[in-house]
Image (tube, rainbow, N blue to C red):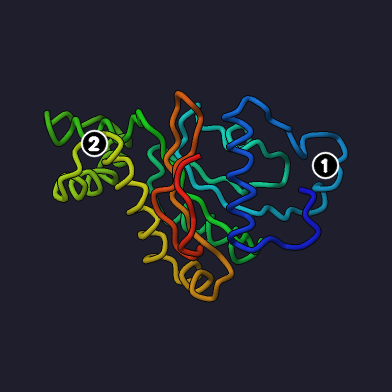
Amino acid sequence: MTETHDPTPREAFELLLAGNHRFVAGAPEHPNQDAVRRTETAPSQQPFAVLFGCSDSRLAAEIIFDRGLGDLFVVRTAGHVTSAEVLGSIEYGVELLDCPLVVVLGHDSCGAVGAACAALDEGLAPAGYIRDVVERVTPHVLAARTAGRTQPEEILAEHVSRTVDMLLDRSRILAEKVAAGRTAVVGLCYRLTDGSAQVVAARGLEAEVTTGS
């Protein structure tokens, strides 16, 4: 990163979005991916964002946001479902690493969301611990449908938005950081076909945040 000061939540958000715009345009700069950066970050890390996203192999954070070593503190689970370990990891990023931005990143054609819909519609419960993932997504699918949001993109947006709220509800550390203006939490939905990240929720950013890429 070339910034000479610690970014504000909005600056961190704009920095992340700028990288996605470059990726969508097919003009990535691949910043902070050389030997110099490797040496710089070896003693310590100062990422500008915590990225909590789905484990999907097509959702590689440093690629789709055109960033490099030491830029993003990444936490990933299938369907971006939360747990104590996830919350602890996010709190580590905002409390100990002082990240000014937390991003919840979902994507279309998410297997976990699709499995939750299938479980509700057809009674198809997956085996093993996959079932636990699906059961954590299911309440958000139900909430979307109850509100009349039945299209796949609407259900995904609901899942991402409710995950944002869940993080703030369950983490006192994160909620206090947002209330103090030191951290923002943003929910993004990623489109696999064109690579764009669309804003569906924002807590702690000014009202003029624009959606889309």
Q: Position of residue 135 (x, y in %)?
A: 25, 43
Label drawn at residue 112: none
| Frontmost residue, 156 versus 197 | 197
User: In the image, is residue 28 above or below residue 4?
Assistant: above
Say which residue label 1 marks: 37
Which residue appears at 37% of the width and 32% of the height? 108
| Residue at the spot 50% in from the left edge and 34% down from the top edge | 196
Location of mark 2 (residue): 116
Give left or right: position of 184 versus 146: right
- Label 1, secondary structure: give it: helix
Instruction: Identify whether 83 is placed above or below 123.
Output: below
Residue type at mark 2?
Ala
Q: Residues within 10 Å of mark 2 (few under 14, many from 20)?
A: many
Q: Nearer the viewer, residue 24 or 97?
A: 24
Label 1 neighbour load within 10 Å: few <14, some 14-19, many 20+? some
Mark 1 belongs to which amino acid?
A: Arg
